[in-house]
Every structure is written in structure tokens, then in C-alpha cells.
Amino acid sequence: MFLKIFSFILIFVTIADSKVIELKCNPNFDVQSIVNLPYRCINGLSCFFENINVDENTNLVLNYDEANYGLDCVGFINSTISILPSNLFNKYCAVSSLYASGIGLKFLPQNTFENATNMLDMNLSGNKLKKLESRVFSPCKGLKKLVLSHNEIDEIDMDAFDHLDGLEDLDLSNNKLTNIPHKALAQLKNLRTLNLGNNTLIVRYGQFPSSLVSLDLSYNKLENFTLKSIISLTNIKYLYLNGNRIYRFRQHIFPDGILEALKSLKHIQLSDNEFYCTTLADIVIWLEKYKIHIDVEPHWMIINSSNIRGVGCKEESRFFL
């Protein structure tokens, strides 16, 4: 496919206390330099806005170029803006990919994506978002992938993900989440991959949709986790529990009969927890009985200290008189 990439530099002209924005094409913009860029932005008709640095009191309104009506992707590069331009998707309503990573976004007003009805994937990672408002993403009914990692999100409205029936991949890792309303996630009936790693999440029964195939709960300071809390996840295949504070006996974490309910579970990560070696040995024996593989990332493979299958553990101190 013929690659067409446009990058626009925004030039502000102040006239009677208002700012007029002029768009100029930068033909030298190197799209290959961007990490994790959606494939639609690489292989489709794309437009990138570059070098925008404005404070939160500036209202960005874009001029429209009819030649770019059929854009596949819109992105922001090397910029600092607190809020997306108010008429972004009025102008570029055909866009199916948005790349707005690491640009300092602080707010997503409820009407941000009002006309983004063709959106399929969205990357809003690495910003300063704190709250997801009610129905903020609802107009994007065909959205498949949503990346919100590495923000400061500590509050999600129960209706924030309403009408996202086609969402398959949601990344909320590296935020400040503790409580997520049950409805917010449970209603996502086609969600397959959910990453909640590096939060301080409290896991509750019925919180996740039964469609999940992969669930990442790593680095959440979990102590009393039990698989009973995710018993409804009958399609779960990959479970990441590494980097927590789990230490309880096998019968608490993996109670008898639980794997009859979670028959699809095939891979689990347990590295960097607080297991005593005797407890971990019981867990390993029990998981291997059900042919569940304990995955260990290479950088967490323990070799020079107490471990079982590369998963580190603590020796119990016993004192005899």
C-alpha cells in the first residue's frame, strides 16, 4: 500500500486576543521513529500535528483541509496540550486511529469523541489523565483497542465504557486505581485482554467480564488473592499475578475444585511474591497436576537463591530446643 504521511506544524497568530491556527505540511516527518504506532497510522493516510505547546487555558480549534477528509489516523507528536482540539473529530470524522501518547493531556471532556464514530483504536498513554468521565468513549461504538496506561487515573465513572460492546483490548496499567465500579468493566462483553498491572487494585467478585482470555493483575500489592474471586472467568487462559504480596497457603489461593470452573487456564505468572518455599512447592505440584504452566519472565528467573521452577521463595526458619 502506498504510504502517505502528513505532519502539520501549528502556527499561532494572535488577532484581537484570539488565536488563529495555520496548518503547514512537514514532508520530512519520520513516522517510523514512533514506537507502538497503530498499523493504520503506518499503512494508511495519516496526519500528525507537531510542536504544539500551549497551556490549559488555550482552546485549540483546527482549520479543515478537505484534501484530508479520508484520513485513517490522526496523531500528536512532540507536543504539550492539556485537552484535545474541540473540533478534532468534527473535522476528521472518518479517522479510525488516534495517537495522542505522552503529550500531557489532563482532561477528556464528555464530548471529546462525540463525532469519532469510526474509531477502532486509541492510544492515550503516558499523559496526566486523572478521571474517566461518564460515557466519554461511548460514541466510539466500534472501538477495538484502548490504551490508557501510564496516566494518573484514580477514578473511573461506572458509565465510562458504556456502549463499547466491541472493545477487545483495554490497557489501564500503571495508573493509581484502587476501586473500579463493577459495571465499568463487567459490561464489556467482548473484552479479551485486560491489563491492570501496576495499580493498587482491590479485586472484587464479578468485577471482570467472563469473556476475558488474558488478565494482568501484576504489581497491585495483592495479599489475600484467591481464584474464587475470578470464578466467572471461564475463558481465562493467561493470568498474571507476579509482583504482588501473595503468601497464603495453596488451599486459599487455589481452592479445591476451582480449576474445574476455570478449565481454560493454561498459563500463570507467580514471580516476585512472598511465598515460603514449602507453600510454593504445594502450589507448583497442584498446578502441574492440572497441566498449568508457570511462566517466568527471563529477568525474574531466580538462579542463585531459593526457588522452585525459577520462581523465588523464602526458606522457613525452624528452631529446635
Image (tube, helix red, strand yellow):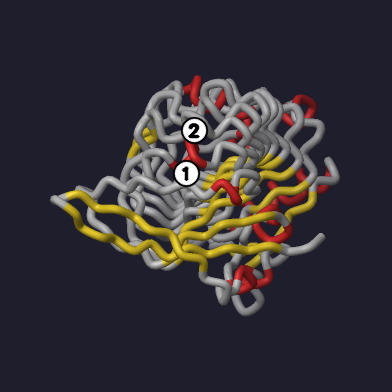
Relative to residue 59, is residue 239 drawn left or right? right
* Disc 1 packing (10 Å; few <14; some 14–19; many ≥20): many
Name the element at disc 2.
loop
* Disc 1/disc 2 C-alpha distance (Å): 8 Å
Mark 2, other Cα within 10 Å: few <14 / some 14–19 / many ≥20? some
Between 276 and 224, which is closer to the camera in this rendering?
224
* Position above or below: 241 against 162: below
Kind of residue at badge 1: Leu
Q: Give the residue drawn at x 81%, y 48%.
A: 288
Give the quadrant of residue 178: top left
Residue plotted at (42% across, 48% down): 63
Residue at 42% across, 65% down: 9
Q: Nearer the viewer, mark 1 or mark 2?
A: 2
Question: Is the Cβ of the residue at disc 1 closer than 8 Å to that at disc 2?
Answer: yes
Q: Nearer the viewer, residue 105 or 185?
A: 105
In what quadrant of the picture does the N terminus appear?
A: bottom right
Q: Which residue is mark 1?
A: 222
**Residue pointed to by mark 2:** 203
State the SS at label 1: loop
Identity of the residue drawn at 29% across and 53% down: 20
Residue 150, by quadrant, is bottom left
The image shows residue 153 at horizontal and vertical percentages of 37, 43
Residue 13, can we see it? Answer: yes
Q: Which mark is residue 206?
A: none
Relative to 308, 264 lies left or right: right
Against 160, residue 201 (above or below) is: below
The answer to which of 113 and 124 lies nearer the viewer is 113
Quadrant of the frame with the C terminus:
bottom left
Q: Position of residue 310 (x, y in %)?
A: 69, 67
Answer with mark 1 or mark 2, whichever residue precedes in sequence: 2
Task: State whether residue 5 is above or below residue 146.
Answer: below
Kindly tell me whether residue 245 is visible in this rendering. no
